[in-house]
Amino acid sequence: MWTCRKQSDAMEEAHEIKTAACHLCGKRLLVRSLRAHVATVHYDIRNYECNICGKRECSMAKLNKHIDIKHLNGSQEQKCPVCPYESHRRGGLLRHIKTIHAPSKDHMCNICDKRYISKSAASLHVSRVHADPVRRTFQCSRCASSFAVQSELNSHFRSAHDKEGHRQHVCKFCFKVFHKRSKLQVHIDIVHEKRRDHKCNLCELAFGQSSDLKNHVNIVHEKRRDHKCNLCESAFGKACDLRKHVNIVHKNRRDHKCELCELAFGVAGNLKKHVETVHGNCRKHMCTLCDSAFGQADHLKIHMRTVHENIKEHKCNLCDSAFGHAGNLKNHVNIVHEKRRDHKCNLCDSTFGVSGALKIHVKTVHEKRRDHKCNLCDSAFGLSGALKIHVKTVHEKRRDHNCNLCDSAFGEARNLKKHIKRVHENIREHKCKLCDSAFDEAGALKMHVKTVHEKRRDHNCNLCDSAFGRASDLKNHVNIVHEKRRDHKCNLCDSAFGQAWNLKTHMKRMHEN
């Protein structure tokens, strides 16, 4: 049923040496075991079923051994004197004691100094961990995964893609499918029973698996980055992170595409988070100190650390700026100090330092999208953050950021910074080449050149012949001139004004004397 000419040839060639390599995974076995290996491992053929428990075996001899050990107690239990481990065979118990409790790790990896109990285990470690991800020869035909040995590719394919023809173990809580019963049990223990038996002695964290604890200690506390990229200077704590880095950054692979928009991701988990947070608007992780909500727990942690605890560990060597995230520091250096604007708009001359800013620009400026509408007035915004600030400053009249040098207060920290820089420090870094004017922001200089020197008035009023250089000026014109709105009222008299600065001028002239 499963034999083929290729396997038969391999068996005949290896008849003299009694071993042969499996043509499906490359593993070398005794000739007498090769047929059973192919039948059970690769084709899952087990024709002999136990009438007591239903377990299936590939031969009558193995079925009889199973019945003798499991059901007839034909073999005396061998108990470990150190832990609760039990084995039906003395050899299994000795192997357990040698590997777990008294390991003699004589075989060392020449690259990272890790030690193993056997030469084959050390060789497998080198092929799995230190093999160059770019040169991994066994590539999965269904996804971006690649492997150093054929057997790992076969195991990956069976578990990830080949759902038919193999016995599946289904989780009764969430119906997730596993190809191994042991993997299912680990999943239930960690995900559903929330077991965290492996505790870190250096911090309060606990993990479901010992391997996760070991990785945590190596990466977080010992700051080890043993897996280095051959194409750049990046280094990682885990081999899987290095593989993801190579696929995403250097190979530019984005195999996981969103069906609801045009975005694509290099990691399936990022796609899942994107769908939940962006399209499903799922923000399960709420901040207890403010109204912020996040789709991911680690984003909430970053928010708490940087906003409320004011912990910003990543400091810029070129100025006094500090950031809570390494990626923000990198963007700061590229944009502010190196003046890099690598992301260009195809519809106008605008350039941006990060791709996200370009996407927002296209969405709000060219597509005129205002998806976030205020429930208290007719205002609409392109960003949810802008809507939050609008509600806080306009409707709730909150000005939480006070200036220590004057009585001014602002709804946003960045506006307070601009105020101090412009009013009190009188810093005008951006100078006009056509006149003596200077500005504190590049955008203000750009608007000055456009409206004053180029005389551009792109924003036309639909109710009269007036035209303006800025959209905000057009909005103020419509509110004040055509709608006769006077939202800024004086508390000391009956006067009302269309703009806040007019009210301030009135207060100074009429009431301060």
Image (spheres, helix red, strand yellow):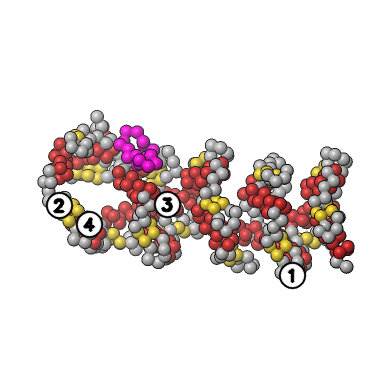
Of tags 2 and 3, which is closer to the observer? 2
At x 12%, y 43%, the residue is 72
| Viewer can see residue 179 | yes
In the image, residue 294 lies at what x, y percent? 55, 51
Of helix, strand and loop, which mostly describes the magenta segment?
Answer: loop
* Residue corresponding to mark 3: 240
What amino acid type should be assigned to the residue bearing mark 1?
A: Leu
* Residue corresponding to mark 2: 77
Extreme residue in the left direction? 74
N-terminal of the pair, mark 4 or mark 1, is 4
In the image, residue 75 lies at what x, y percent? 12, 48
Q: In which quarter of the view is residue 427 placed? A: bottom right
| Mark 3 neighbour density, 10 Å: few (under 14) some (14–19) many (20 or more) | some
Task: Please tell me whether residue 61 is drawn above or below residue 84 in the rendered image.
Answer: above
Disc number placed over residue 405 in the picture, else none: 1
Q: Is the C-beta separation of discs 2 and 3 under 8 Å?
A: no
Q: Secondary structure at mark 4?
A: loop
34 or 47: which is nearer to us?
47
N-terminal of the pair, mark 4 or mark 2, is 2
Q: Is the C-beta separation of discs 4 and 2 under 8 Å?
A: no
Which segment did they paint magenta?
A: 158-178
Q: Secondary structure at mark 3?
A: helix
Magenta segment includes 175: yes
What amino acid type should be assigned to the residue bearing mark 2?
A: Glu
| Mark 2 neighbour density, 10 Å: few (under 14) some (14–19) many (20 or more) | some
Q: Quadrant of the C terminus?
A: bottom right
At x 28%, y 38%, the residue is 42
Task: Please tell me whether residue 49 is drawn above or below residue 237 in the rendered image.
Answer: above
N-terminal of the pair, mark 1 or mark 3, is 3
Q: Secondary structure at mark 1?
A: loop
